[in-house]
Amino acid sequence: MDFKLFVFWLFALILIGAAVGVITTRNPVQAALFLVLAFFNSAIIWMLMEAEFLSITLVLVYVGAVMVLFLFVVMMLDINLLPQREGFTKYLPWGGLVGAAIVVQMIILIRVKWGSTEDYPAPVPKEAGYSNTEELGLAIYTDYLFQFEVAAMILLVAIIAAIALTMRRRPDTKYQTPGEQVQVKKEDRLRVVSMEAEK
Amino acid sequence: MGFFAGLWLLIWTVIKILMIVVPLLLCVAYLTYAERKVIGAIQVRKGPNRVGFAGLLQPIADVLKLLTKEVLVPTNSNRFLFLIAPILSLAPAFAAWAVIPFSDTKVLADVNAGLLYVLALTSLGVYGVIIAGWASNSKYAFLGAMRSAAQIVAYEIAMGFALVGVLMVGGSLNLGDIVRAQEGSIFHWFWLPLFPLFIVYFISGVAETNRAPFDVAEGESEIVAGFHVDYSGMAFALFFLAEYANMIMIAALAVIMFLGGWLSPVPFIPDGIGWFCAKTAFMLFFFLWFRATFPRYRYDQIMRLGWKVFIPVTIVWLTVEAVAILLEISPWFDLRAA
């Protein structure tokens, strides 16, 4: 077996195992850690397809930042583990239906010929100097500039909305204003009294 | 490629990895010695001076002590995660060294996206801290982990933006090319045109490595030793190793991106790996100096510095830089052309 194929199967299997782990494990922190493993393995599979920019960005953004926040939240929650299982059989058919729909859609989308990989030849390896970061940048900032800007605008609106929704003014909290702290003079804090020496 | 050619490549790569890891471990050992000596000198005392000549064997003695101690696993902790956490914190600290160019030719993996790779790996180090804090089943450790998670997310954004500035003038993600773009003399290095980003990067680096004055994840006076309060023996030593390896890493990256890597500061002295090491040692001194000088930040002060000071500073400077590049204003435009 080709070494590349071996690596693909190895990490694809770990990826599937981790994905199953996310939904089967009872502990939410362990589920989040399984998700981290899944992200990491899909990054490796992207790397095999020579998409190094996307692959490293997946690790940097999702594993390095998003999942850290996820874990932060999940660890703070005090989830009672038992009641979670109660609705399992009740919702199973619906879950199965949604899952099946997703699989059918994906099959239609990529038009898999069952058991044959002819339609999907392996990508031709690029020469050593090829930088797909540059190619991606060129594509985003020339051909897809409008879509890119629209996406950026939507994200900006989402950020502002999220801040507006969670911001609470609490007037009774004591907090410092560093600007005022920095500008404090000696006269504001200290009073020098000249007095007679005591005997 | 034949079987033996493949085997030889494998052996040669392993030898090269050892050539990086073994000196790195020695550097970590003697960085702990240097730290105790430097802080000793700042506080007008001697520091370690009993084991070997002038205390030079002290790190070796410490390692032996830690090796022979028992590794305790607390009750009701998650055993697997508890034991894997130190490894998760050490592995990224070492793996990131694969793309560091020590001189013009000496680099293990000369990859195109080197800068991204380094950023991704340094961001993974936090998992060791979080998992250790959670798996220990202890409130102090948990508090340390929570603090660390919030802190690292805040400072990573500032750090990433600072590196975007380097990328804009360097014109490449390859660390070797970034150094080559700084060719010339000390005034061609990126620290001068990117001075605010240099400061932001280095302070964020101190925060990312959980060093004083940003060491709230450990915070001896409030939460004992933070995330590693329940670790002992070699498991504790791995956290220690990771922290110091990360310090050297941040210093080396600052040297590569802002201080011209292996390049010599004046044109008539030849370049070489010696310059790289000397500059890294110079940056490392700041870590020790900070620790001996500044009191620990309060938690809300850390958050304020990260989100409300550093991120705006980097965004403003990126705008300045972009305009300068667009209008072809020296020195930014010159650097890009180089």
Image (tube, coloured by chain):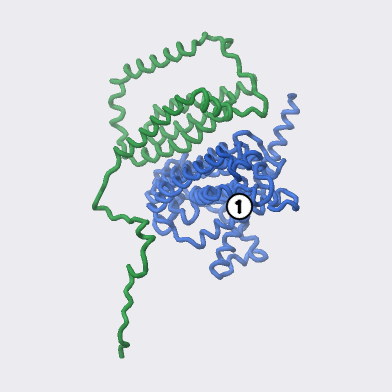
Chain colours: A green, B blue
Q: Residue at x 27, y 53 (%)?
A: A173
Q: How many marks?
A: 1
Q: Position of residue B286 (x, y in %)?
A: 56, 57
Query: Is B57 left or right of A80, judged from the image as shown?
Result: right
- At label 1, the amino acid type is Val
Q: According to the image, label 1 marks what residue?
A: B28
Q: Residue at x 41, y 46 (%)?
A: B307
Q: Nearer the viewer, residue B180 or B25?
A: B180
Residue A115 position, x and y percent, is 54, 9
Q: Is residue B224 left or right of residue B169?
A: left
* A77 lies above or below B293: above
Where is residue A93, by image quadrant? top left
User: Is the residue A121 above or below the residue B319 in the image?
Assistant: above
| Residue B71 relative to residue A92: left or right | right
**Quadrant position of the C terminus of chain A in the picture:** bottom left
User: Residue A77 location in percent, x, y?
Assistant: 33, 39
Residue most extreme to the left: A172
